[in-house]
Amino acid sequence: MSLDISRWNLRIRSSAAPAYRAIADVIGEDIDSGRLVAHQRLPPVRELAQRLGRNFTTVARGYAEAARRGLIVSRPGTGTRVAERVRTGAVRRAGPAGLPDMMMNMAPEPEDSALTARLWQGFAGIVDRQEATTLWSLLRYDEAGGPPEDRAAGAHWLSAHLPEVSAERVLVFPGVQAALLALLMTLARPGDRVACEAITYSGLKGLAAQLGIELIGLHSDRQGLDPDAFAALCATDPPAALYCNPTVQNPTTATLPAERRRAIADIARRYNVPIIEDDPYRPLTPEAPPPLAALAPELCFYATGLAKCLGAGLRVAYVAVPQARYQARLAAAMRSTMVMPVPFMVRLATQWLQDGTVDVAAEAIRRESAQRQRLAADILAGTGFAAAPNGFHLWLPLPAHSSAARFAADLRARGCAVVASDAFSVVGAPKPAVRVCLGGPVSRSGCRDMLQAVAAELVAATDGVAARATD
């Protein structure tokens, strides 16, 4: 039986659930209706992502969710198939229950009762204001880029590492991803080229594909983007912009040292190339070198938000623009795509910035992330993984000649989800590696279980490569 992709697309778009859950839902519906039968093979993740018009990570997470529900199983050599039904009508689980989904790069949720109480007080501080003016202000359209008070709160927060920033140069967006969409729409046209790291944020790949923008992957190493590679590209054909995630890069965790930042800023200035600086992890690493926006303020569009230092559901981000003339263009891009940030969220973010809650939460997340990184250092000792001391993801290289996609599929069969390096590659087949996320709602003990599953799978992958080499 073949998949009805048009029906899948319709069901996923119309679902109120996140896209990855909607994918698992539609698989379950097709099993229940008989449109999918036991042992039927499903398309590989990349193929299904193309057919659905979704990014690799979303579809991979959808398969992981379906596997966790016992709807499908993934095995090396046989791909992903519909699970065998048992007599009760339920389906067998693909792996042990209780292991977490470590695909989405979410901040850990500290077990800190004082912080929890403080966050609830923040919600109550808005909800309990029972004046009609407050209520209706939360239900109206906000001005594009955010009201002055909210822009001022964002500018004050950014001024810790961008001392020259002013509220007039800051816009409020519904999350960094929305900000990146508006920035790409403003700085590039379909067919233009945007430079980035060869292994880059998968969300950038999805946006570029939607906008018809070509990404040019530049050589990077454990210290991040290579300035010489950027200079060589600019000397031959300068790109429309450079995208860079210089602090705790997603996925490799690299942080650009100060000398490379200065070199990249100088090159961008020499060739007049705008820089999109995506810096969501700086609150976790306040000791990081100054942002590119502090070195080339006339060229840099600086984007950061609260998702990584509070929670992914707080979709509030701030963009500092180099010149006021860009404000109207970015605001127009926002209005045409996502209209505006949610006023309630923006007011909540402003309150938490003003009363210091953001700083308290970021410190708690740094402490919890450091504990989880110590777990990783113990369990994955000797594997050569890369991580930031206070970050909540790591980059795990796999044995040469192994398959990152197969490794991820085998982990899904254990009930644990990671993201293969293919999802982040801009320049073809990358070296095999996976991104492992340590945050989200999972407890520290659950994180330990996941890391042990990863370590066990890594041993199996290493043994498999060795066995193939002796055949």
Image: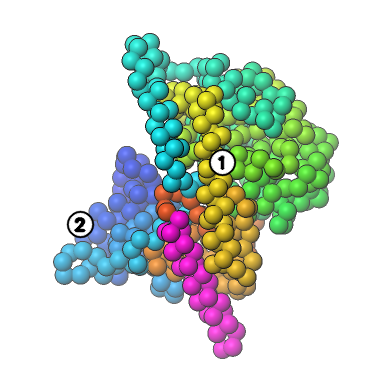
**Disc marking residue 33:** 2
Write down the region rendered in magenta. 444-471
Q: Secondary structure at mark 2?
A: helix
Q: Nearer the viewer, residue 111 or 279?
A: 111
Q: Quadrant of residue 128?
A: top left
**In the image, residue 331 above or below residue 467:** above
Instruction: Residue 268 in the image: state x and y as whole percent.
Output: 78, 38
Kind of residue indicated by mark 1: Glu
Which residue is identified by label 1?
A: 363
Instruction: Residue 162 in the image: state x and y as whole percent.
Output: 70, 29
**In the image, residue 106 above or below residue 43:** above
- Residue 22 counted in the magenta span: no
Residue at horizontal 40 percent and vertical 23 percent from the top: 125
Q: Nearer the viewer, residue 88 or 115?
A: 115
Q: Earlier in the sequence, mark 1 or mark 2?
A: 2
- Residue 455 counted in the magenta span: yes
Query: Is the residue marked by circle 2 packed among few (<14), some (14-19), or many (20+) residues within 10 Å?
Result: few
The Cα–Cα distance between marks 1 and 2, rounded to whole angstroms, is: 49 Å
Q: Secondary structure at mark 1?
A: helix
* Residue closest to the far left: 88
Q: Is residue 6 visible?
A: no
Q: Quadrant of residue 150?
A: top right
Query: Is the residue marked by circle 1 packed among few (<14), some (14-19), or many (20+) residues within 10 Å?
Result: some
Kind of residue indicated by mark 2: Ser
Instruction: Residue 325 in the image: state x and y as whole percent.
Output: 67, 19
